[in-house]
Image: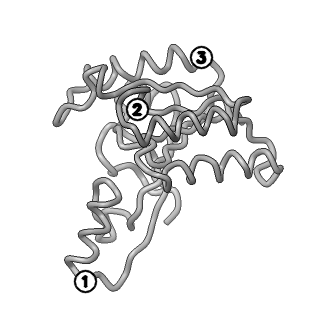
Amino acid sequence: MRISLSSTFVDRDAYGLVTIILDAVSSGELPGVEIAAVISTRGEGDNAQTDEMLARFQREYPFVPLIAYSAKRHGRLVKDPSDEVKDTYDRAIFEQLGAGVQLNVMVGDMIIKGPFWCHEIPGLNLHPDLPLSLGGTEGIYWDVIGEWVRRERQEIGGMMHLAIPTLDAGMPVAY
């Protein structure tokens, strides 16, 4: 199965999520999986820490295609973007990705995919909480963890859910 991985590369944990999967594929722990590309929703110059991670990634994994396409510079970081805005950004990445990707795995990706992307490539999103239907919290991981602390939650979790154009609302695949 040809997959792509996508991340915003906001910190070393996001980097680690991507590289753990790449290393598992390389070692044969995930037989039958081929990494078509790694997608960063931050491009060069968006963030100094991300720039360092992307340079490190290219040194450590020169055999893995990297698509670093700035959501910031391409109008994607607006509050409540329309499906048209989402799709315009997603189509630009899709064109760079090429055909044959069967699944996109979002690990530390802070950009909600639009309808076009969700129709063309099924996606799984790693989310740091239980499904919403079980009392989980939507949002980016530091907000979710902050909410755990504020509410003094006794039960926490994580899930993989189907990526849909609505924040963290896709059907859970595992939790």
Observer-nearest residue: 147 or 16? 16
Circle nearer the N terminus (2, 1): 2
Q: Position of residue 84 (x, y in %)?
A: 26, 20
Q: Residue at x 57, y 53 (%)?
A: 16
Q: Which mark is residue 42?
A: 2
Discs 2, 3 touching: Cβ within 8 Å: no
Q: Residue at x 61, y 38 (%)?
A: 57
- Report crowding for label 3: few under 14, some 14 to 19, many 20 or more residues within 10 A (C-alpha): few
Q: Give the Cα distance between marks 2 and 1.
A: 33 Å
What type is the residue that disc 3 sits on?
Gly
* Helix, strand or loop at mark 1: loop
Residue 50 relative to residue 66: left or right? left
Q: Which mark is residue 98?
A: 3
Observer-nearest residue: 119 or 85? 85
Q: Give the Cα distance between marks 1 and 3.
A: 45 Å
What type is the residue that disc 1 sits on?
Glu
